[in-house]
Amino acid sequence: DYILDKAYFIGVIEDLVVLAEEKKDYFIQLDSAIGDGDHGMNLSIGFREVNKNLEQWKTEDINTIFKNSGTALLDKVGGAAGPLYGGFFMKFGLPVKGKEEVTFDEFIEMMESGVAIIEKRGKAVVGDKTMVDTLRPAVDALRKAYKEEGLSPKDAMKKAAEVGAAGSDSTIPIIAKKGRAMRLGERAIGHRDPGSASSAAILEVFYKNMP
Ligand code: ADP
Ligand code: MG
Ligand code: MG
């Protein structure tokens, strides 16, 4: 049976730390166009804080590692993305509390749990030009690809990442109904939502690390 072990999840977090640095300028650039320009900095600060403590969390179970990471993001990151991504990580491991490894069915429930709290906190739906435009279609595609279309776990996650990237693309031609870009009205048209871009990059990390 297909299993995602703790090493997978730790590898994901380590790569998210790297991602936050590598894409910092890109996220800053996107957020400068239709926000306040801090999205890249917010993620960098948050994941640096995660990285500071990750080594000592490694003996904990999967849920605790993500809960601690989420708390770090929540505590250190201001703005919208801190509570939203913080919430994602706080809730991500909840369906597998106490476990050291998870099945792919459980992994799908983890993703659903994380995305659901972002939707709940942000009250955004698909089409509002936020990270939800990436995450909701991605997690729906993940479930469908694995449970209905019979794709392998890794191919299902690849599909989810691709659908998420397309979701981020879909934010470009629309106005924002949530977040700072809302105030810009039509001037937001033609610009990618920064949170949708970081979410797509995060999904890619979950995919690439899969065995
Ligand atoms: P801030 O806008 O407070 O400066 P960031 O720049 O770090 O925070 O994050 C902005 C991103 O947060 C947006 O690009 C969008 O994807 C996401 N976002 C903002 N408000 C919401 C919301 N209500 N629901 C979901 N996502 C949101
Ligand atoms: Mg910002
Ligand atoms: Mg800000």
Image: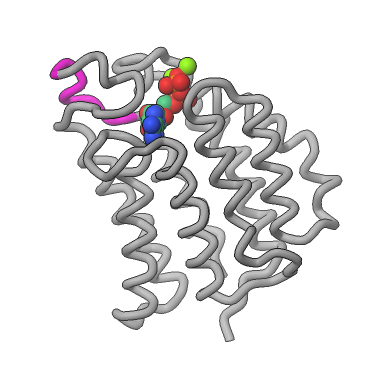
The colour scheme applied to this rendered structure is: one colour
Which image quarter is the C terminus in?
bottom right
Apparent side of residue 194 relative to residue 48 in the rendered image (left or right) = left
**Residue at point 23% right, 25% down?**
191
**Residue at point 74% right, 53% down?**
64
Rendering quarter of residue 209: bottom right
189 falls in the magenta region: yes
| Range covered by the magenta-colored residues | 186-193
Which image quarter is the N terminus in?
bottom right
95 falls in the magenta region: no
Residue 68 picture location, percent across and down: 73, 44
- Looking at the magenta stretch, what is its main secondary structure? loop
Is 35 rendered above or below residue 65?
above
Q: Is residue 195 visible?
A: no
Q: Is residue 134 visible?
A: yes
**Residue at point 64% right, 48% down?**
13
Q: Choose between 128 and 48: the one closer to the eye.
A: 128
**Residue at point 69% right, 48% down?**
67
Residue 158 picture location, percent across and down: 39, 63
Is 136 rendered above or below residue 16?
below
